[in-house]
Each structure stands twice: as structure tokens, then as C-alpha cells.
Image (cartoon, rainbow, N blue to C red):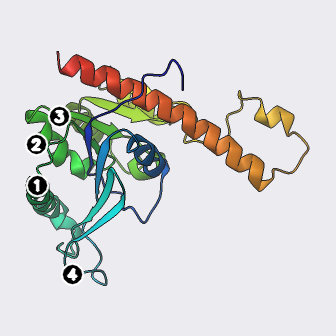
Amino acid sequence: MEGTAILSDKRILFAGGSAWADPTEQHFLLDMLSASNVVIWANPFGPIAGSLLPRITNLKDGFTIYNPGVNYLPFSWLSDLNERRRLLQVNMYLLEKDFEPDLVWIDDPLAARFTRYYGKKGALTLYYAHQDLDKTASREERKQLAAAVDLILTPSPALYKKYREHTDRAFLLSGDDLMISSDSGTEAELEGEELSAELLEKAFLDALQKCFEEVSSILKNELSKKNK
């Protein structure tokens, strides 16, 4: 990764709506960031059939999964209250760990409560706009979300365009949701041939590595500016 500004020695809290058990590219990106940073991934409240008590899983040095357990009120109209309770519970865990985030990462508009709280405490805050997770957000919700975070990252050109209406601190990542890019040469090379699992995996890993380098460089630059 010569020439790439890799983020290091930061405390990162993921407090979005994604559970660790439901992988997206964010899982890979935060796992890669944990090689040189300390990452805590805070799951949403668990389902009724799940564990009643909080669980802590140390995946490896520098990466911890915090599961708050079953603690939510199962009504959609109480989702905002649930997120307030989740913020309180995660905060209590972080206080026990003496963990003050430098960066707070979310992927769910409801989790903007985390970015507002930690943004006031000096953390850099970001929203990762994922096509599957953001598709139900309204224009007004996107406007409010853009105001609640320092920056927005997305691999989706469509979402990038929507968020640029509300902020100039939106960044379009390479890969278009980490699918095989038409300008990568891969499609031309494989035209008329069946895509093997190995080639698909290589294309994904290449796109992921490029995305990771972009994300790391953006975050390092933004944290540097915030700390001036």
C-alpha cells in the first residue's frame, strides 16, 4: 500500500443498524481498519429469541463485538425510543472500557443519535450510505442525516448524487457497491467465458482493497483537519 495514507492508532465505534451476523462490505472494511486501530462494533438490540443479556466477543486483537442483547420494544413506532435506550446502553459499556471514540461510523438513519452525541464530544462522524440499507430513506431524512454527520461515504453513484444535494462532504468510493467494474478490464477479459468463483473472488478483493485504501485515506485526512 505504498503511497496510501493508512489510518492508524484511532478508536472507532461502529453503531449503525447492521448486525455483525449480516455481513456487508462494511464488515470487511472495519476488519481491515482494526489491523492498525481499535474497533468496537455495537450490534443492534437482538431478537426476542436471542440472548437476554449483553455479550462481548473479542474477534481478535483490536476488534470487539458488543451485543446489547434483547432489550428493545417490539413496535415500529417505538424505534426512536429504542435507539435512545441503545445509545445509553452502549455508552455505559464504553465508559466501563474507558473507550472514547475518535470516529463514529453508522449506516442507519436512526443511529444518527450516536453521531450527534459523539460529534459534540469531538469525534469525527460518518454515515456509510449502502444501497440496501438506505433505499427507504426519504429526501427529508437524507437532509437531516447529512446535517447530523461530518461526512458521508458511499460506493453507490445514485446515493452519492442524492446526498450531494445536501452536503459537499459526500465521497463516492470506487466499486459501485463492490461489484465488478466495467472499466476495470475484467468484463472485457472474461467476455464469452463463464466467471469462475476464483475470478469473482479476486475481483471482489481487488475492489475491496481499493475501497479500503480510499476510506482510510479520507478518514485520515478528515481526522487531521478536525484535530487542527
Mark 4 and mark 2 lie on one chain; the one further toward the N terminus is 4
Q: Is residue 158 left or right of residue 228?
A: right
Tag 2's secondary structure? helix
Cα separation, mark 1 vs mark 3, equals 14 Å
Is there CB contact under 8 Å for labels 2 and 1?
Answer: yes
Tag 1's secondary structure? helix
Residue that numbered label 3 is attached to: 123
Q: Is residue 212 left or right of residue 207?
A: left
Q: In the rendered structure, which amino acid carries the disc numbered 1?
A: Asn
Q: Is residue 145 left or right of residue 91?
A: right
Mark 4 and mark 3 lie on one chain; the one further toward the N terminus is 4
Residue that numbered label 2 is attached to: 117
Residue 43 visible? The answer is no
Cα separation, mark 2 vs mark 1, equals 10 Å
- Looking at the image, residue 106 lies above or below residue 218: below
Q: Quadrant of residue 151?
A: top left
Q: Position of residue 182 (x, y in %)?
A: 71, 32
Cα separation, mark 1 vs mark 4, equals 18 Å
Mark 3 and mark 2 lie on one chain; the one further toward the N terminus is 2
Residue that numbered label 4 is attached to: 52
Q: Position of residue 164 (x, y in %)?
A: 37, 25
Mark 2 and mark 1 lie on one chain; the one further toward the N terminus is 1
Q: In the rendered structure, which amino acid carries the disc numbered 4?
A: Leu
Q: In the rendered structure, which amino acid carries the disc numbered 3?
A: Ala
User: In the image as oriented, which residue stretches furthest toward the front?
Assistant: 61
